[in-house]
Image (cartoon, rainbow, N blue to C red):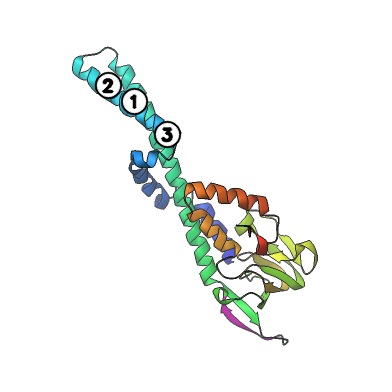
Amino acid sequence: MEAMKLQKKVTASTMLDPKILLPAITSAFVKLDPRLMIKSPVMFVVEVVAALTTVIFVRDLVTGGANPGFTFQIILWLWFTVLFANFAEAVAEGRGKAQAESLKKTRTESQAKLLNGADKAYRLVSGTALKVGDVVLVEAGDNIPSDGEVIEGVASVNEAAITGESAPVIRESGGDRSAVTGGTQVLSDWIRVRITAAQGSTFIDRMIRLVEAPNGRRRRTRSRSISCWPASPSSLCSRP
């Protein structure tokens, strides 16, 4: 259920969400600072041209120049272009922060059924307390607490919260379908999972760093993540 709730929260974080929309409007004007705009050379040039055109328009009003209405229309379009670009960037940043908060909540609130040695008994522990090598039991309706490898059992897993794909996938021990990702949900049957990722290096941790990173680093990280996504979650983007 937690994975499905996470997916709904991320979907709800749209441009019409007041919690994102209102701060984005303010941020669009704050981003007019040339020191911030210069990070985007194209929009920086548009802002400079808009400022120069505004100066020309004021001069024409004072000196009685010809066609001030035409110049005013150009000014409106130029400033609208700059502000809309800033607004779109601010909305993207707001959605990224909202997604990061949802992922953090999922990570901190997850519970794991930690198996005690050879017997079948388990005890509930926090998902953040798991270590590499721990074995957990994940039954129907449970969230997989961390990245790992299926060592026993077979189950249908909903990975929509991570991949966006609504169709469930089969995860079973052995072969290429044994890797599982923390934050996904088991829909049927049960599996025993050996944890293969330390806290701070799980897929959710990487996603949080991705959406919180500055724009330039985010683009580079996204490119690297996409290139290594087919690998098992435990080795996802392990290269420096």
Nearer to us of marks 3 and 1 is: 3
What segment is highlighted magenta in the picture? 120-126
Query: Can you name the residue that lies furthest to the left here?
Result: 62
**Image position of 62 with respect to 145: above or below:** above
Mark 3 or mark 1, earlier in chain: 3
Quadrant of image for the N terminus: bottom right
Query: What's the distance in space between the residues labelled 1 and 2, CA to CA?
Result: 8 Å
Kindly check if marks 1 and 2 are in contact, taking CB atoms under 8 A apart as contact: yes
Residue type (three-letter) at the residue carrying disc 1: Ile
Residue at point 24%, 13% (across, down): 65
Q: Amino acid at mark 2?
A: Phe
Q: Residue 42's image quarter?
A: top left
Label 1, secondary structure: give it: helix
Foreground of the two, 198 or 4: 198
User: As drawn, which residue projects farthest toward the front?
Assistant: 240
Q: Position of residue 131 (x, y in %)?
A: 61, 76
Look at mark 1 in the image and give the residue it sits on: 75
What residue sits 37% from the left and 49% below the top? Answer: 23
Indicate the secondary structure of the residue bearing disc 2.
helix
Point 39% across, 46% down: residue: 24
Label 2, on which residue? 57
The 10 Å Cα crowd at callout 3, few under 14, some 14 to 19, many 20 or more, is some
- Position of 52 with respect to 150 (left or right) is left
Looking at the rendered structure, the kind of residue marked 3 is Met
Lateral position of residue 63 relative to residue 121, left or right: left
